[in-house]
Image (tube, helix red, strand yellow):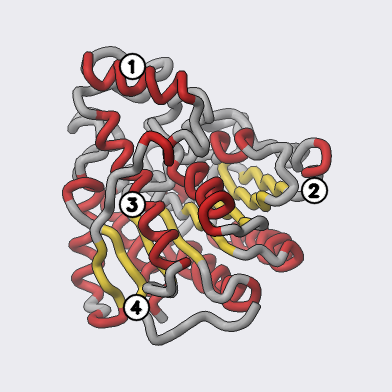
Amino acid sequence: MGQAVTDTPMFVYKGDALANYGFGDEHPFGVDRHDAFQTELANAQLGTAIQYADPRRASVDELALFHTAEYIDLVSKMSQEGRGFLDDGDTPAYPGIFDTASDVVGATLAAVDAIMAGESNRAFVPIAGLHHAGRGHAAGFCVFNDCGVAIEHLRKNHGLKRVAYVDIDAHHGDGVFYGFEDDPDLIIADIHEDGRFLYPGTGCAEETGKGRAQGTKLNIPMPPGAGDSEFEVAWARVVSHIDDAAPEFIIFQCGADSLAGDPITHLRYTEAAHAGAATDLCELADRHCSGRIIATGGGGYNLRNLARAWTRVVEAFAA
């Protein structure tokens, strides 16, 4: 479909609306993740290669592109009550969580819209990639699934059909996978720690899609302790899978909890894995998608790791 437009900057989304998504100092997903990344990115001194952009809030109608009306209503009610959990104990329902989670979705949709409008060639949304939320439930620190909403938004509001979702977070992106398991036009490649050792316990290699979608999904479980060399072998399969699929848009979930030293996972990548993956996906986007690609930050609970890994992704996107 041609090369990317190169005379537009890449957008990086920032601001309190994103920073506020978190669950307190004692929770792994704290509100300090946004600023840790932004400080590292500022130190990279990328100048005019990037442009900062503001998130917006997703509407209820936009959330309903992926989520059920019953679930949206449940989150709204529990957000007003401000107590309890939205799932089995990972995702607290604090006051205002509905609006905060809607801001994350809105930021990802804003990135998609900017690229489709030709305002930006690529985009990065740090506090996003909430890939565990299902169509009708919260899970694993994720209230609304911004990636799932973005996929449906690209189809309904931008007329695209074939979208690729690539996920290198240590945790399997189960909310996206099972939300589109029987969809032949949603191409998935997900490298994650083996579910026998890590939440959510899904994403085995035999899960390749159902019905007409069989073969469109690629799950690559990695053993605990796997590092960059093991990642490179798996990543070659991802590149081939996405290249063969020739998508019209790529969504990259680049969770940094797959780096060595994360407190809740067991993989041992360095930020070089994220930089290399981002570079390769940009090449694929230029080849097949007119350059259209966004990255979402996903997980990562070691602040130094996420700051460095996400900055390497931005550097690759801005190159």
First in sequence, mark 2 or 1: give its number. 1
CB of mark 2 within 8 Å of CB of mark 1?
no
- 204 or 242, which lies in front? 242
Asked which secondary structure carries label 1, the reply is loop
Q: Which residue is mark 2?
A: 215
Q: How far is disc 3 from disc 4 in space, using C-alphas?
A: 17 Å
Residue that appears at 78% across and 44% down: 213
Q: Position of residue 264 (x, y in %)?
A: 40, 36
Q: Amino acid at mark 4?
A: Pro
Q: Position of residue 229 (x, y in %)?
A: 59, 62
Instruction: In the rendered structure, find residue 85 and report the number of the disc placed on it.
Output: 1
Q: Nearer the viewer, mark 3 or mark 2?
A: 3
Q: Amino acid at mark 2?
A: Gly
First in sequence, mark 2 or 4: give its number. 4
Residue that appears at 82% across and 42% down: 212
Q: Which residue is mark 4?
A: 9
Q: Amino acid at mark 1?
A: Phe
Q: How far is disc 2 from disc 4 in space, using C-alphas?
A: 35 Å
Q: How far is disc 3 from disc 2 in space, using C-alphas?
A: 31 Å
Asked which secondary structure carries label 3, the reply is helix
Q: Amino acid at mark 3?
A: Ala
Q: Position of residue 246 (x, y in %)?
A: 70, 66
